[in-house]
Image: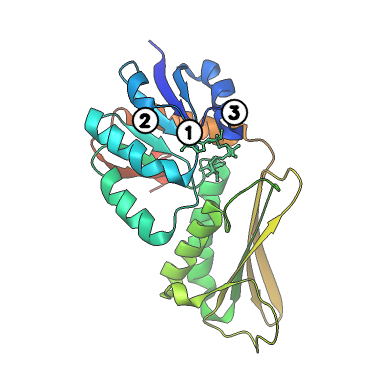
């Protein structure tokens, strides 16, 4: 029996990519919901919910998943950090995979960034640059946010170290700063670069997505995996066995 998916955000770019990828991955979209629909009435037939919609939808969808004890895969980004903490506590009541990026390559980039930050340390000025299509509504991207979390953890810095763009008389760069820059334009699906710049050398780690199908396939892979897990919040590193 193929995996039965309730897909929320089904009319969006990612929703359409997931619907296109499902048939080759032993999965069926048994219900497709979008803004204005009530997912509750379609949930009985579903084994799992996949959500790529809007951050406004996450709380009510999680409450529904908890009430009906359905596993959920969340790809939606754009939550502020205090909302995200509250939502993660809710999400832990059901089996939940929550990832800012479902691609295998980006999950390797996360692991490489952790290692590079630990090895290079404070002498290497660290900046994150991301570029996405002109329609993206949030910045920096969920993937850039995760890269920044990893860098702050390894450097033992808090969020006050972040510099979102620079403008005017900023003064010299401080060693404890971590820069973040969001470029927007055209149809770019998602580029991320972590730059480590020292006096005399520079290292750049770059990932470029050229097809949304990588996220769609990752999300469906996560859905197959999460239906067999106990309640708790997991990420793509768990799904891929990278931890
Ligand atoms: P999109 O704007 O093309 O699609 C979003 C869809 O959600 C639209 O059809 C919209 O009508 C719908 N929607 C809005 N509010 C809703 C609500 N309250 N309930 C149900 N549906 C609602 O956007 P997209 O490019 O498909 O991206 C969707 C989300 O997924 C964004 O947050 C984006 O950043 C994120 N994303 C995550 C990954 C990942 O790997 N985690 C990859 C790509 C995009």
According to the picture, the residue beneath numbered tag 2 turns out to be 225
Indicate whether 102 appears above or below 112. Answer: above
Which dot marks residue 169? none
Q: Secondary structure at mark 2?
A: helix
Between disc 1 and disc 2, the foreground one is 1
Extreme residue toward the top, this view: 1
Mark 1 close to ligand 1, CB under 8 Å: yes
Q: x and y percent of residue 122 in the render?
A: 52, 80
Residue in front for this viewpoint, 180 or 106: 180
Label 3 vs 2, first from the N-terminus: 3
User: Residue drawn at (55%, 84%), measured in percent from left and top?
Assistant: 175
Report the quarter where the N terminus lies: top left
User: Residue drawn at (44%, 58%), measured in percent from left and top?
Assistant: 80
Q: x and y percent of residue 170 in the render?
A: 65, 85
Crowd rating for badge 3 (residues with CA inside 10 Å; few <14, some 14–19, many 20+): some
According to the picture, the residue beneath numbered tag 3 turns out to be 17
User: Residue drawn at (53%, 27%), measured in percent from left and top?
Assistant: 10
According to the picture, the residue beneath numbered tag 1 turns out to be 219
Label 1 vs 3, first from the N-terminus: 3
Q: Quadrant of residue 12?
A: top right
Which quadrant of the figure shows ligand 1?
top right
Mark 3 close to ligand 1, CB under 8 Å: yes
């Amino acid at each position: 029996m193929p995996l039965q998916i309730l897909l929320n955000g089904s009319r969006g770019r990612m929703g359409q990519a997931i619907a296109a990828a499902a048939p080759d991955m032993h999965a069926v979209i048994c219900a497709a919901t979008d803004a204005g629909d009530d997912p509750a009435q379609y949930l009985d037939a579903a084994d799992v919910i996949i959500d790529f919609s809007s951050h406004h939808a996450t709380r009510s969808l999680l409450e529904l998943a908890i009430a009906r004890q359905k596993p959920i895969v969340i790809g939606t980004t754009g939550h502020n950090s205090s909302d995200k903490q509250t939502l993660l506590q809710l999400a832990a009541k059901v089996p939940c995979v929550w990832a800012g990026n479902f691609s295998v390559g980006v999950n390797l980039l996360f692991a490489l960034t952790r290692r590079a930050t630990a090895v290079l340390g404070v002498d290497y000025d660290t900046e994150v640059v991301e570029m996405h299509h002109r329609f993206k509504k949030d910045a920096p991207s969920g993937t850039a946010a995760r890269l920044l979390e990893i860098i702050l953890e390894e450097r033992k810095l808090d969020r006050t170290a972040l510099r979102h763009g620079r403008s005017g008389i900023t003064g010299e760069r401080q060693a404890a700063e971590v820069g973040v820059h969001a470029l927007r334009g055209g149809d770019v699906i998602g580029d991320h670069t972590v730059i480590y710049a020292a006096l005399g050398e520079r290292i750049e780690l770059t990932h470029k997505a050229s097809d949304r199908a990588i996220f769609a396939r990752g999300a469906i892979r996560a859905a197959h995996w999460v239906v067999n897990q106990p309640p708790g919040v997991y990420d793509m590193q768990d799904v891929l066995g990278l931890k």
